[in-house]
Amino acid sequence: MANKIEIENFSVYWNAERYLNSISLEVKMNEILGIIGPSGSGKTTFLRSINRMNELETGFKHEGLLSMDGNDIYSPDTDVVLLRKKIGIVFAMPVPLPMSIYENVVYGVRLSGIRNKQKLDELVERSLTEAYLWNEVKDRLNISGLRLSGGQQQRLCLARVLAMEPEVILLDEPTSGLDPISTAKIEDALNELKSKYTIILVTNNTKQAARVADRTGFFLMGDLIEIGDTRKVFTSPVKKETDDYITGRFG
Amino acid sequence: MIISPKNMQRGVVSILTAATAITVLILIFIIFFILEKGLPVLSLNFLTTNPQDMGKSGGIFPTIIGTILLPAIALLIAIPLGIFTSVYLCEYTKETIITKIIRFATDCLAGIPSIIFGLFGYIFFVNTLEMGWSILSGGLTLAVMVLPTIIRTSEEAIRSVPQIYRQVSFSLGASRWQTVKKVVLPNALPGIVTGVMLSIGRSIGETAAVIFTAGSSLRIPTSLFDSVRTMSVHFYILAREGLSNQNAYGTAAALIIAVLIINILAYWTMHRFIAKRN
């Protein structure tokens, strides 16, 4: 399979302190790449480097190469707004914007200039269906997104990203605050979505990576310790640290 | 002596209750006092006729026009200027020594007595720019006076919009301006409106800054360069010169009722806006 994203010797510094050490990996087209590791290992920093969310905060510096379809993401010529439309992100905390469910879903699309009501309606139905939320909210699309439960809110956040028809979806511990049923719904959605999208899933839940990821990478203190097919990483890891983490000896 | 937590609690509750009660009572007393003296004078005739004999008799019609025009000009200028400034300070600059100086300067400006603004307006707008005692001079002076309040309250309101909303908006491919327009400003609106309300109140009630810059003509103005008298200036002159206490109270009552109506209208509009969004 072709590579969607290629990362070479990528390092990140916050205020001159190093948070990611020369990471090299590639993400294949239409795969789910799981990223596991203890908190503070640089998973989120890594994820947010890909759609350039890190630079919204002060003190961010990077080195190395990060490219999508062969185009340097950090090139001065890159249109960041366009980049973020192609690479959607779902945050750890479900954060619907304080507007209706419908408006939440079409937020990004409207910004791109789509006004046609019928097109927007279709988009809302399709995205919410893909996010496994349509049946629960189809009769109350005009209530505030804030009135949904936590699990529903997170699926709304996923639908919001799907509506933009991105190429890559980044998920930052999307189920960390959710109950097992909501978690299962999101995982089901992901399994269906990978036929259309390339997905990177950061998770604190190693079992979740084992369940849904095609390949898994293990981060520890800013280093990529190991990356490979999920089954292999979980059954016969090469590095001792990976084995220790997966079997729960630390982290 | 040791006070038990339970008695402490009782004590604190009674102090807080008393403080609130005193505040409310003072407010009610003032309003009641003025309305009691002023309402008998108020009539449609009083509001729609010109003053006679320097205001000893007759109505207050020209001062109503002044009271509407001056704050209207002030707010028309100060609201966009103030909101754009605070958006710039909050969203488009990083926190540096310069933004700190700007903020400190705005705080200082907000605390300056209004008569100083009046003096400034007199020297700058009336004399230097040769606008004379006019609606325009008065409006511009009031704009300068309420600008710091609008900037600071809008800034607080904009800062209180959760940072994560901006991140979500950016992550969905919004530009900074789109984020400001669609997420930041709508959510900061209640706070901004509060600042605007305060400014309306201040500019309607302002006397010192206005008397220096808009003058106190009792004629009905026909252009922005005409002098005009506001209700508060009228009240001040009537009371100070001992022309007519009765008409002074009538003017005061009209002023209080006008401020109340404006406040109610503004809050009603804001609540409708918020209800529509949710």
Image: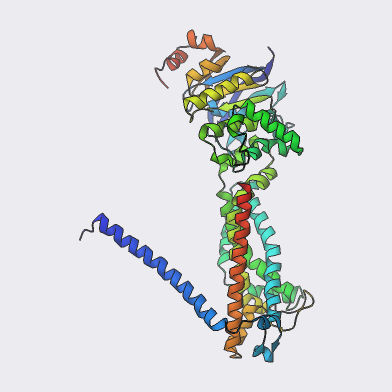
Query: Is B223 placed above or below A95 here?
Result: below
Looking at the rendered image, the quarter that the C terminus of chain A falls into is top left
Query: Is A80 placed above or below A207 here?
Result: below
* Colouring mode (rainbow / by chain / secondary structure / one colour): rainbow
Asked where in the image residue A53 lies, by quadrant, the reply is top right
Asked where in the image residue A107 lies, by quadrant, the reply is top right
The x and y percentages for residue A145 are 58, 39
The x and y percentages for residue A187 are 55, 22
Looking at the rendered image, the quarter that the N terminus of chain A falls into is top right
Comparing A101 with A96, the one in front is A101
Q: In this rendering, would A222 be left or right of B273? A: left
The x and y percentages for residue B85 are 66, 55
Q: Residue at position x 63%, y 58% from top? A: B269
Query: Is A115 placed above or below A197 here?
Result: below
Q: Residue at position x 48%, y 72% from top? A: B27
* Residue A242 visible in the displayed image: yes
Q: Which residue, as the protein is rendered here, is positioned at the far front?
A: A139
Comparing B70 with A223, the one in front is B70
In this rendering, the count of numbered labels is 0
Comparing B61 with B114, the one in front is B61
Comparing A219 with B268, the one in front is B268
Asked where in the image residue A115 lies, by quadrant, the reply is top right
Q: Which residue, as the protein is rendered here, is positioned at the far right?
A: B222
The x and y percentages for residue B267 are 59, 60
* Residue A84 visible in the displayed image: no
Query: Is A71 placed above or below B219 here?
Result: above
